[in-house]
Structure formats: C-alpha cells, structure tokens
Amino acid sequence: MSEARRLKGMTAIVSGASSGIGEAVANALAAEGMNLVIAARRADKLAAVAGEINAKGAGNVLPVKADVTVEADVENLFAKAVEHLGHLDLLVNVAGVAQATPIEDMPYDEWRMVLDASITSVFLTGRAAFRIFKPQNRGRIISIGSISAKAVRPDAVAYCAAKYGLDGMTRAMGLEGRDHNITCSVIHPGFVATGFGPDAGTEPSRNALDPKDVARMVVLAADLPDEANILDTTIVPIGQPFLGRG
C-alpha cells in the first residue's frame, strides 16, 4: 500500500463486489481513500458491503445492481458511476463464474454462461471504460483471471477457455489503449478461499489464498504511476501443485 496514498480521492468501478475477491478489492481500494461504485447482481448483499465500507469512513461507496453480461446494465452502471463520481480512474473486473463439467456432459447454455461471465462482461465494461478514458487521456483496467490461463485443469474446458481469452483480451485492450495512456492488467490467482466454485468454504492456508491477498495485488497495480503497468502477474498459495510435477 502506498505511504503517500496516491489513490486517495481517485475513483473506481468494481464488478462482482458483493462477496469474495470483489468484496475484498472494494474494501482495499476504499481503505486507500478511493471513491467507488460497486456492482453485482445481488442487490441486498451489495448494499450490505457498501454500508460496511461507508460506516468505516474510508471511501465513498455507491452500490449499483448490475449484471455485467447485459449491455443495458453495463451502460446504466457507467452512467451512474460518472454521475456519482464525476469521473473515472479505474475499472476492476472481478465478476465471473466457476465451472466443473466434463466436455461431453456440458450443456451449451453452461458454455455460454461461463464465457459471457469472463469474456462478454469484460468486453462490455472495457468498451464503456474506453469511452470515458480516451477523452481524458488516462485510465486503468485491472481484471481478475486465473491460473487456469497458465495451466489447465480437468473438466473445465469453458472456464479455461474463458481465462485464456481474458488474458488475450487484456493484451489487445492494452495495445489499443497505449497511445491514450490507458493501461490494462490481468491478475491470475491460484486457489482462493471464497464462496466461489466447488471448494466453497475452504479457509485460507498454505493451500488457499485469502481474498485479501489478491486485493493487495490489485492495490499494488492500481497504485502505479500512469506511465507504468503490471501487464500480468500470478499469485498462488505455496502449497498449490502449480509448479513442477506437483
């Protein structure tokens, strides 16, 4: 975290902020003094997260119910964000879904759901952010990926495809944004102890990251000066069989 609190007074949208990594990211950015609009589909949980952060007296947080796979919801989210925040410095894409189905058993609707959550959502939010960032000649987008974009896992063809795609999208958006001082990053976590996925309820340990660990990486990337960028990084619990033969 920056001793100078460079992020204080800056503004951000965080998607998927009603729980898990998104909730941790919202708390971490607000603790740095940022003003936020947080988005998720669960309005009650989202409002509770905003209320808890605002009660701490850190940043100013507005909850906006939105499904970021839906174009109209994203347009409404960004309109409310600009109205509430006045401008936008940062977009953090956290929303996503897990999947563990053998390919021969996977319904087409499940394939579409997983790709929409990780790919369509980032296209829609990224497009909306670029429309704000280009005229102001600056801005930053940070997306949460997965080590499934580095090493595939079984029964997860849609999830792995989505996370590999997100990595490529980040690089493509970064190239488009380079001449406009727009930076794009992707953070690839290993297993995180959240309510997300088949291992929900796992506690942080040497085999599972705390969501706050991932949030710290987001703050580190966001806190860089405009001319610097962490293009991609991987954060894993030391006990996860990711390196070598496991």
Image (cartoon, rainbow, N blue to C red):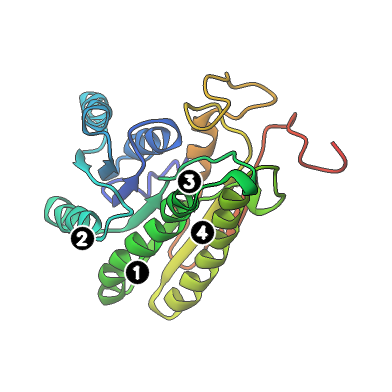
Q: Earlier in the sequence, mark 1 or mark 3?
A: 1
What residue lies at 27% left-to-right and 43% top-to-bottom? Answer: 39
Q: Which residue is mark 1?
A: 138
* Mark 1: few/some/many CA within 10 Å (<14, 14-19, 20+): many
Number of residues whose C-alpha sits closer than 10 Å to that of mark 3, classed few (under 14), some (14–19) or many (20 or more): many
- Which circle marks residue 185 in the picture? 4
- Residue 208: x, y in percent? 63, 27
Q: What amino acid type should be assigned to the residue bearing mark 4?
A: Ser
Report the amino acid beneath label 1: Arg
Residue drawn at 56 percent across, 46 percent down = 106
Q: Inspect this view and state whether residue 30 appears.
A: yes
Relative side of 55 to 83, left or right: right
Provide the secondary structure element on which disc 4 rests.
Answer: strand
The residue identified by callout 2 is: 75
Mark 3 residue element = helix
**Residue drawn at x 38%, y 56% as measured from the top left:** 121
84 or 117: nearer the viewer: 117
Instruction: Check if mark 1's residue and mark 2's residue have beta carbons within 8 Å.
Output: no
Most extreme residue toward the left is 83
Q: Secondary structure at mark 2?
A: helix
Distance between the alpha carbons at the discs numbered 1 and 3? 18 Å
Figure check: 63 above or below 13? above
User: Is the residue under label 4 in contact with that under label 3 (CB below 8 Å)?
Assistant: no
Pick whichever of labels 1 and 4 is earlier in the sequence. Answer: 1
The residue pinned by badge 3 equals 218
